[in-house]
Amino acid sequence: MNPRIKFAVDSPHTNPWVERVGKIVINFSAIELECIHWLAQLSEDSNSLARFAATPFAARTRQVMELAQARSCSPVWRKRSMRLWGDALNLAKVRNRVAHNPIVFAWNSPAEAGEPDFIGIPSLRNSGAASRDSLLSKAAADKATNQMAALAQSLRDLRLEWSSARDNGRVPPQPEALTSRSMFARLLEKVVNLARRLMGRA
């Protein structure tokens, strides 16, 4: 017999999921914060934090990956940063699934007695309907939670490694962006050149 699937609304059967859902959301928020840190530091544009935060995570991550490619401190660092941010995009799918889909549960018998035979979070956008095979299981949720925590720490460590390399002059300059000092230097150069031309005409 096919199991009967129901949406869980304040059901006691979902209590074991409350902590899991909270951990997934909170742990992924650390990755979100790292993404903003990376953008601010690699772009050298701390004045755009509000704009960075308002950008969807996938688009923000692509910006980070472009900057990491352009301002890599070493080939090993570049390769690792690409891999880690690719992992972040994959884990974002789990976070989105948890945030935008209901918890469902089902029994294999019509009586619906006792604990459900299975419980989990479907991906309704992808599958169109909830099935036993489409559910995010407890084990998968716990695995994703641990992966998110480890990834947030790895991204932090990699960012600090880049910051140290930057402070020691081992990072390429930001392409198509000028620091305030370089902007002033260029402006001063233009003023000097204009003054020379005017003096030549006199």
Image (tube, grey):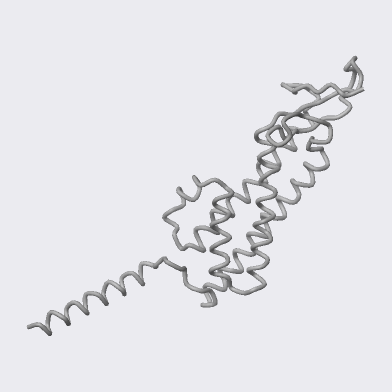
Which x, y percent locates residue 5?
A: 81, 23
Q: What residue is rendered at 31% in x and 71% in y?
A: 184
Residue 133 horizontal/vertical position (percent): 83, 36
Is 12 placed left or right of 43 in the picture?
A: right
**Picture quadrant where residue 119 is located:** top right
In terms of depth relative to the viewer, which is nearer, 125 or 49? Answer: 125
Q: Residue 183, relative to residue 156: is it above or below?
A: below
Q: Percent x, y for residue 108?
A: 91, 23
Residue occupying image coordinates x 57% and y 73%: 165
The reply, left or right, for residue 125 in relation to residue 33 is right
Q: Is the residue 150 above or below the residue 140 in the image?
A: below
Q: Quadrant of the C terminus?
A: bottom left
Residue 8 percent coordinates (x, y) = 75, 23
Q: What is the quadrant of the N terminus in the image? A: top right
| The quadrant where residue 103 appears | top right
Q: Is residue 95 above or below residue 88?
A: above
Residue at image x 68%, y 57%? 153
